[in-house]
Image (cartoon, rainbow, N blue to C red):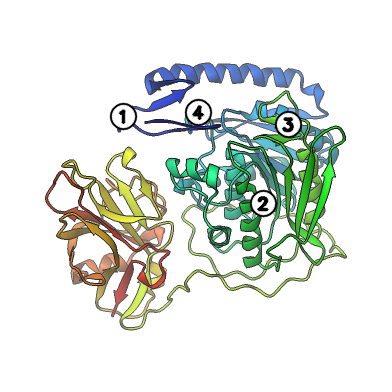
Amino acid sequence: VCLETGGFHFVQYADLTRKVYWIGDFCFTSIFSYSLRFLDKMIRAVATFALLLVGTAFAGQVIQFPFDNRDNLVYVPSNFQPGVGGLFVMLHGCTQDPQDFMAGTQMNTIADKYGFVVLYPEQPSSANINKCWNWFMSQDQQRGSGEPQLIAEMTQAVMQKYNVNAKYVFVAGLSAGAAQSVIVGATYPDIFAGAGVASGLEYAAATSVLEAYTVMREGGPNPSTAGQNAFQASQGKARPIAVFITHGTADTIVYPVNGGQVAKQWVATNNLAGTQLPSSPSNKTQAQKPGGRSYTIEDYNQNGQTFVRFLKIEGMPHAWSGGSSQGTYTDPSGPDASAMIAQYFFSFVGNVPTPSPQPTPAPNPSPVPSPVPVPTPAPNPTHVPTPAPVPTPAPTPVPNPTPSQAVYSVAGETGFVGQLPIDGYSSTVVKVGDKGMFNVDTFRAILSFRTADLGNATWSTASLRLYPVSNTGSLTSISVDIKSGCFTSSPLINGYEYYAAASVTSAFEIAITSDNYLEAQIPSDALEYLRNGSACGRVQFRLHSIGTPSFNGNLITFATAADGNKAPQLVLA
């Protein structure tokens, strides 16, 4: 299925073996795409060589930085001081590449002024045919998974190579890159002290291609909810960070409603991390670039310190404000976003409040190493006192279950996976069944529980409890597989769990009834799999349907891990 959505271009899988892509007015298969990707690589190689030749246009050096088979670029200014200078990570938008984004934002010129390194990661067409960062995919919205982990590891590789001061590390992006910068800032606040968001969207605004199209026009979930989700995404590493947002009032690709939602989301996220920011802007300032566009600055402050700054730029389309026409998606008539972001971030870091104590996070399956420690600068006289810690809204884990006590499934790790890529997967929907037309077993549910939550107390029985939300068709029962550990290398839903090996298949069945909830006892000889979660620290269940194929679909959905007391649960006694 080919789908074009304004400036964003997405790809859906047609089947297991071939891809169908959209270019202009044509769809074509992956066989043809290989030659285009080869041509694209040749063009980028020539462009990179040209940048290296004309590098004297900047005061420093443009250096190729291969990582994960990506053609990334790094700019090192001549005045960079190891152990002192910081790092900006710049995430390009759809159809762009590092060379284009470097030329358009002119961030290298700002780096010359402040003496910081700039990393331009590449999103290749092999990851997304239109080079969009996959901000709308669940696996690319989590710490220790997908693109956030890739960007964090790439960032730390640059930090270690150039001995970057870990206090001054920031991320910024345009469009799809802006949406991903929000995700990176939320998932790795322990690495990034600030996030720049140019024409972007709030954290996890969408979890599918079609949903992405909707939120780009209409906005995403309630910013308060998105703020809580962003706070929890750090897995206990949250701290207040600086956020700088730019959005044009004439943006018809990512509509202006999204810029306001980004601001509100980060107010909520920072408040959960320890600040006490107001729900409305602390102050508003009208300004105009000489000979250019007018704009409004909205600041959200605590004790005079700005934590979230939002620039609404009058009449600006989908673009990097103040950029150079040497790059795509820029608007030279707007205020200089590159200069303003850098100035704001560096002034912010000197008086960022000490993070409030956070709960010990759950084991991270793929932790990113801590940055190289650096000496802490002298305290700033305008240091903002640390507010009282705000309790994490997530349910408190049960360290030692008492008899007949429930342990709830883990959000982000509980959902469904489809039989084929086109059938999708999600961590926000739990469903079992088929899509009709005489298909069988299209959707399988995945339930994930932390073995640490099961505790060390003695318990002799366990049952699995599910709360149905809807039930159509004629399913009679559900078969349950058990995995001691994780079905794949990560506990997060990633789409590969459908066919992954289980520790025991069809361990037991759950009868589908009209009761308020469904519950089945786990056989005693299968309890050993609950006590040993291996290196993954999990026990996972895979649910598949038992029923008769028919023209109409047979599907049952259940409450998700976000549904409080109705979340999937293990009942121990």
Amino acid identity at mark 4? Ser
Q: Earlier in the sequence, mark 3 or mark 2?
A: 2
Query: Answer yes or no: do the residues labelled 3 and 2 have beta carbons within 8 Å?
Result: no
Residue 82 visible to an observer of this rendering: no
User: In screen coordinates, is 550 left or right of 571?
Assistant: left
Which residue bears the numbered disc 4?
125
Q: Quadrant of the C terminus?
A: bottom left
How many angstroms separate mark 3 from mark 2 (CA)? 27 Å
Question: What secondary structure is found at the residue carrying circle 3?
Answer: strand
Q: Dot 1 surroundings within 10 Å: few (below 14), some, or many (20 or more)?
A: few
- Residue 218, above or below 478: above
Question: What secondary structure is found at the residue carrying circle 4?
Answer: loop
Q: Which mark is residue 192?
A: 2
Q: Which mark is residue 331?
A: 3
Amino acid identity at mark 3? Asp
For the point 71% across and 42% down, the residue is 88
How many angstroms separate mark 2 from mark 4 (CA)? 26 Å
How many angstroms separate mark 1 from mark 4 (CA)? 17 Å
Which residue bears the numbered disc 1?
17
Residue 185: x, y in percent? 62, 51
Between tags 1 and 3, which lies in front?
Answer: 3
Residue placed most toward the observer, 76 or 4: 4
Between tags 3 and 2, which lies in front?
Answer: 3
Residue placed most toward the observer, 310 or 376: 310
How many angstroms separate mark 2 from mark 1 (CA)? 38 Å
Residue 99 in which image quadrant: top right
Q: Quadrant of the N terminus?
A: top left
Question: What secondary structure is found at the residue carrying circle 1?
Answer: loop
